[in-house]
Amino acid sequence: MSDMKSMSDKTPSSPERRHFINAATVAAGVTLVPGVMLIEVAHGRPEDQAASSAVRWGMLVDATKCATGCDECVSACSTENGWTPVAESQHKKQAPQWIRKLELQDPLTQLETNLPMMCQHCAEPPCVDVCPTGASFKRADGIVLVNRHTCIGCRYCMMACPYKARSLVHEPLNDTQKPDVPRGVGCVEACTFCVQKVDRGDGTTACVEACTAAGHNALVFGDMNDPESEISKRLRELPTKQVRADLNLNLGVRYHGI
Amino acid sequence: MASITFREVEGSSLKYWALFGGIGLFVLFGFLSYLYMHHHGHVVTGMDNQIVWGLPHVFAVFLIVAASGALNVASIASVFNKPMYKPLAPLSAILALALMLGGLLVLVLDLGRSDRLIVAMTHFNFKSMFTWNVFLYSGFFGLVGIYLWTMLDRNVKAYSKAAGTAAFIWRLTLTTGTGSLFGFLIARELYGTSMLAPMFIIMSFSYGLAIYLMVLVAAYAWTGRTLGDAVMMRLKSLLAVFVAAALYFVVVYHMTNLYFTKMHSVEAFILRDGGILTTLFWVGQIVIGCVIPLVILLSGLGKQRAWIMIASALIVLGGIAQMYVTIIGAQAYPLDMFPGMTVKSSFYDGVVHGYAPSMPELFLGLGGVAIALLVTTFAVKVLRLLPASLDDATVAKLEH
């Protein structure tokens, strides 16, 4: 429950919140308890250890290495997090896509660029600003998440996100759900930087693993606050950009070659 | 000052119950639509991950904006001390409450998890404009409720001006909040401007008064009470001013955008290339919603009650078109993440998003309108909201 813990650390009204959750559990216990139990069982990091702001998780995307037509990162994300690949979805326009491949072309020079687009894990996330219930939140270690229990599905975060990173779950879910990646119809979701893997201590995400396994090495994940981490070293060497840098959101995803 | 007799509508005729039942049927359709959408999820709507807010939001925001505007007649009476408007004030207040209720119901029933409404009432993020709106809506019910009470109960009549002033300031703040729901969004080109707040306020004046006029005339015509031309002429002139002011804001908004090169593409989309959205803008919002009503209201036609009703109805239709263009149009235009580049993806990046509202969405929206009308129809039966007569002689006495 580290994500919940870091939230309550920041929230002065946590006793009231606990009272409310208790009351709601009694009232609607049948539906709530199994979900809560599932998260308790699933997570592996010590409960007394909150996410730390000493760490800032981030990703480097080297668009010069991102291969045309390759979607290994997208497939790996879908498998790891249990969302149906868009090609298999019956309702393609409404299917959630936590990560997607963009094909850019400069109409003047004809230069083509490929890159994956997903939640940019902003340091100043507009989705967190606009969320009425505080369900959209940023963990101390920079990962932007949606609290599955307090998202009311208002979609205001989707209106606010400049990257179209978020999806609403439009229909009841099938049995592809993963035990450590809670999802639900009517709630908004997005890339979590594979928070379940990060909290297990894997130190990487499914998309990065897949890109590396495919031999492209276009993605690097790591702690941007640690000067000795691979991502920090690479970011020092490579010129990178933030998408829509004009918004000054201080993104957790940096692109090279755009 | 001459006194005015307020009297309930008898509401026992077959016509009354037919009206009540007819409106009730739409409330039922709206509720069934909600159940259908809630059971299957938003997959049965035309909304998707591109068009995130659809037709229900168009109706909901329209009703909420119109609600605060409907209160204006009452505000003119108590805040600005115009005695002629005093007999018109109770209907204005009840209509404001009814429209707000209809709009809010549509808004909350369109939530992905409408069953979690209690969460929205207990968890607050005060940086969110939505959170502020939750308080603004609740406060509106409270203040307008108290204001209505001071108008209906002689014992607390002395507080009417204070309550009316509070409600007036609150409704201005509320519409500022509604406009700022969009004004505070950085992601989309057509939002992210403080213009939206005052523009929504002036539009609320216009939509609210148009609805008020139609309800007033219908109530007096169907109950056989006298409604003099003095009242109608005053209100229709006011309506013309509001429509013209709303049109002015729309012109300034688009002219400013057109000056900035980075906005040329999105403005071209709304004004020229947007297909149905462009049609709704020019034909719906501008011609039907502004130009024709202005011609009617400012010409000799505006002296005839039937034409004032037509103008009012056109303003309402134009208002719904405006909300559609404002809400759907801004989402239909693709996000410009990589300026100057063409973009392709499986997630419809770089392409204009189509949107075809489904029947449940339409009926959910109409259900909100129906709730507002049902509440008003019932309220005039059980409360003394309408003067027994508003003939010219009675109204003239109020002025002296």
Image (cartoon, grey):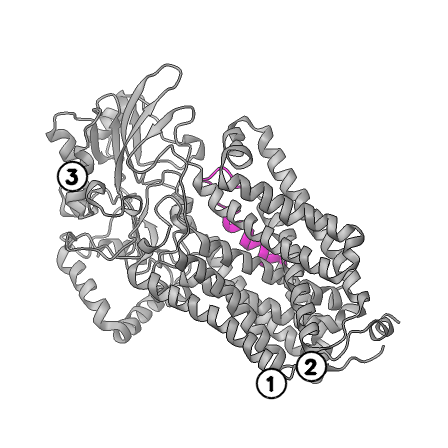
A51 vs A38, left or right, is right
In the foreground, B120 or A85: A85
Q: Residue furthest right?
A: B400
Residue at the (26%, 39%) spot, across then down: A99
Q: Residue B11, image x and y in percent? A: 61, 82
Tag 2 and tag 3 share a subunit: no
A121 vs B190, left or right, is left
Quadrant into which the N terminus of chain B falls: bottom right
Mark 2 belongs to chain: B
Q: Which residue is mark 3?
A: A76
Q: Which residue is mark 1?
A: B12
- The span from disc 1 to disc 2 (Cα, nearest Å) is 31 Å
- Report the amino acid beneath label 1: Ser
In the foreground, B2 or B31: B31
Q: Which residue is mark 2?
A: B156
Q: Residue furthest front?
A: B14
User: What stretch of residues is rendered in magenta?
Assistant: B172-192
- Report the amino acid beneath label 3: Ala
Q: Residue A167, image x and y in percent? A: 31, 47
Question: Would you place residue B149 above or below residue A203 in this image?
Answer: below
Is residue B393 visible to us here?
yes
Q: What SS does tag 2 mark?
A: helix
How many numbered circles does the render carry? 3
Quadrant into which the C terminus of chain B falls: bottom right
In front: mark 1 or mark 2?
1
Mark 1 touches mark 2? (CB < 8 Å): no
Q: Residue furthest top?
A: A109
